[in-house]
Image (cartoon, coloured by chain):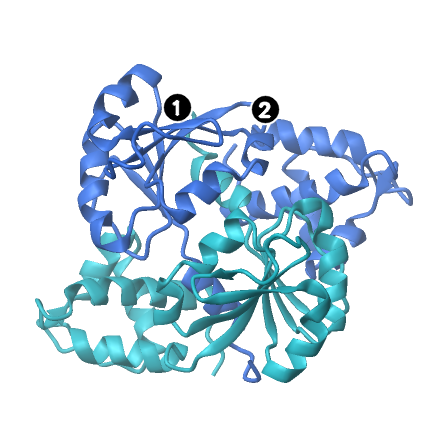
Chain colours: A cyan, B blue
Amino acid sequence: MTIPEKVINRLTMYHFILEDMEGSEKYVSSTKFANFLNIDNSQVRKDLKYVDNQGKCRVGFEVESLKRKIEECLGFKKTKDVFIIGAGNLGSALAKYDSFNDYGLNVIAMFDKDLKKIGTTINGKKVFDIVKINELTGKMGVKTAILTVPREFAQEVASYVAKSGIKYIWNFTTCILDVPKDVKVWNENLIGSFLQFTQNDNDI
Amino acid sequence: MTIPEKVINRLTMYHFILEDMEGSEKYVSSTKFANFLNIDNSQVRKDLKYVDNQGKCRVGFEVESLKRKIEECLGFKKTKDVFIIGAGNLGSALAKYDSFNDYGLNVIAMFDKDLKKIGTTINGKKVFDIVKINELTGKMGVKTAILTVPREFAQEVASYVAKSGIKYIWNFTTCILDVPKDVKVWNENLIGSFLQFTQNDNDI
């Protein structure tokens, strides 16, 4: 079953809420999610149908069971190994972002071209010379790379990475990448996020 | 005019592409944007109507003029001052992320409760004691804060920040915040992004 992207996004946020409730509360209502996220109650109930959970009349959804079902549905327990390309500020911060692990995202190595960084370890993840990516993609069976190099190198590095067998690039740069059709790019457009957030408010 | 959030997001990405073309190419077709972003040509043309730009038959849109119109439309030149709350790895990386400045996002100060961090400077931005936020929000006229504290402190800090007069919280934590109705939260849900990106691909 294909779950729409927006629904996946909201399901992870329901999970964040359930995480905070677990241990202290037994039931949760769809209204609680709706209020937290400032969305419609009907939207929440529609989303939760994807995880095949039945809320009980009056008491709502069982916290633990709903949490587990979201985890199964979104595959949190199925670890996905990823590389980080670019051991600069943002790459290092993401390597140290331990929440990723809780959600099945496992950074197993980093790559850079800076000799001062190559061979060092960031939060337990070794930084390799970028020329090694071809060899290591095959050996480690990694298909996904997080791209955090400076904008001016982004296209060149992405083309190089695409040749190594990487099939998914999570792009944190402000460069829109031109890669072969079989490589999927997800643009983590922080600038766009900020503008979406603040655009329609004239008092900022 | 209110521009839908998705359109704002795509307009910034067209701008990233125009940035790379400027100086080397005079015209750009909607097809070029569509191919880069793997979306429909008709979608691109619909989006560009928001910036009131007229493409010419056969030659397309003028690169420089379209870039400038997107900038005006999305207000890149109108600087928005923001605080970063949490001078840890991610907060520091965002403070060093100079692309923000090109798009009108100006980090003017950071806050933390760690005595070792207070008084230091990260990429020219001074780290203040979090207890000073009330005073500085008023003095500096800042309405927006980027929240990058550890998850376990997120709710407490957000409530504190909301009392200081901050009206917009860009939330990078995995905690869904419960704040007064007049404070707007934008959840930068990186986990959700990753899962959206990889969910429907079974070979990762």
Q: Secondary structure at mark 2?
A: loop
| Left or right placement of residue B163 versus residue A141 in this view | left
The answer to whether A203 is drawn above or below residue B181 in the figure is above
Disc 1: which residue: A203
Q: Where does the image place residue A126, in percent across and percent down from the top left? A: 53, 66
- For marks 1 and 2, give the CA distance: 15 Å
* Amino acid on which disc 1 is placed: Asp
Can you say whether B120 is above or below A156 in the image? above
In the orientation shown, which residue stands out farthest toward the top? B139
- Above or below residue B139? Residue B34 is below
Q: Is residue B53 visible?
A: no
A138 relative to A125, above or below: below
Q: In the visual, does B93 lie left or right of A39?
A: right
Residue at the (72%, 50%) spot, across then down: A153
Residue at 69% from the left image edge and 63% from the top image edge: A130
Q: Chain of mark 1?
A: A
Name the residue: 42% across, 63% down. B191
Q: Amino acid at mark 2?
A: Lys
> Residue B41 location in percent, x, y?
74, 55
